[in-house]
Amino acid sequence: MKQKSPNTLYAYWNELRAGRIAPRRLEIEPSRIAGVLCETFMLERVNALDYPYRLAGTRLCELFGSELRSSNFLTGWQESDDALLARQLALVCERGAVLALEIEAKASPRYVLQFEAVLLPLLHTGNGIGRIIGAMGLASPMPLLGAERPLLRRLMTHEVIWPDGGPRAVLERSAVSAPVQAAPRLPASQSQKRGGPRLRVLDGGRSFWKPGSR
């Protein structure tokens, strides 16, 4: 079973980039991914350890029990995952990698959620990658939501994917145009992976995107 939100976002992103290392932030049309916006988010790269949410879908905020906007994506992980995630996010922003994650989040032994996510680079200012768009879908059964919310996150598996077969310099690839081709599924054979995450399907819901957001 494949996650709908990560695969839908990846297919749209891959079509939109049209052979470039990444599409531009302002090229994203929320109406094209309306069905998965509630599980979509956007990060800003401030520095190597600070990736605040610029936007976060309503379903994600509901599951995590708080408004994610302005909070740091690297906050709330178990200590051993922090440095690894920071290195991988640097690959997204500096080399145009795609990052696929399997995540476990829990607030107590009886409240455990499993998510699958994909993070994708976006050109923002000039030819630099300053934004990351992502989608995170619930891969475990939906629990009854009470007062508990997942506080600690653990990285179960990760996969670094090179859509064009290998890393490329941002400036080298940012201005190249190519005919739009049908977007392939996430190519595990072109990745550096640990544990081989898979993306499963989950229907989306309400839109969260606000026109004019950066």
Image (cartoon, rainbow, N blue to C red):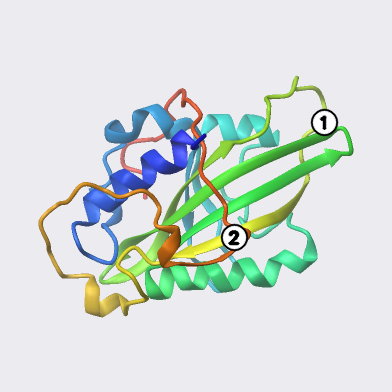
Judged from this view, the residue extending furthest toward the top is: 144
Question: In percent of the image, x 23 and y 49: which residue is there?
Answer: 15
Question: In percent of the image, x 42 and y 27: which residue is there?
Answer: 207
Q: Would residue 106 appear left or right of 129 to someone viewing this image?
A: right
Query: x, y (%) of residue 27?
Result: 23, 49
For mark 1, what is the residue? 148
Give SS at disc 2.
strand
For mark 2, what is the residue? 158
Q: Can residue 109 be seen from the camera position used here? A: yes
Of residue 161 and residue 106, the one placed in the foreground of this image is: 161
Query: x, y (%) of residue 203?
Result: 47, 25
Give SS at disc 1.
loop
Q: Would residue 172 appear left or right of 159 to someone viewing this image?
A: left
The crowding category of the residue bearing disc 2, from other C-alpha atoms within 10 Å (few below 14, some 14 to 19, many at least 20), is: many
Q: How many marks?
A: 2
Instruction: Please name which of the two marks, 1 or 2, marks the residue nearer to the observer.
Output: 2
Q: Would residue 197 appear left or right of 76 to someone viewing this image?
A: left
Question: In percent of the image, x 59 and y 60: which residue is there?
Answer: 158
206 to 208, vertically: above or below: above
The crowding category of the residue bearing disc 1, from other C-alpha atoms within 10 Å (few below 14, some 14 to 19, many at least 20), is: some
Looking at the picture, which amino acid does disc 1 mark? Glu
Q: Would residue 117 appear left or right of 62 to someone viewing this image?
A: left
Displayed quadrant of residue 110: top right
Q: Can residue 49 be seen from the camera position used here? A: no
Query: x, y (%) of residue 183?
Result: 27, 48
Query: x, y (%) of residue 50?
Result: 59, 65
**Distance between the Cα atoms at labels 1 and 2?**
26 Å
Looking at the picture, which amino acid does disc 2 mark? His
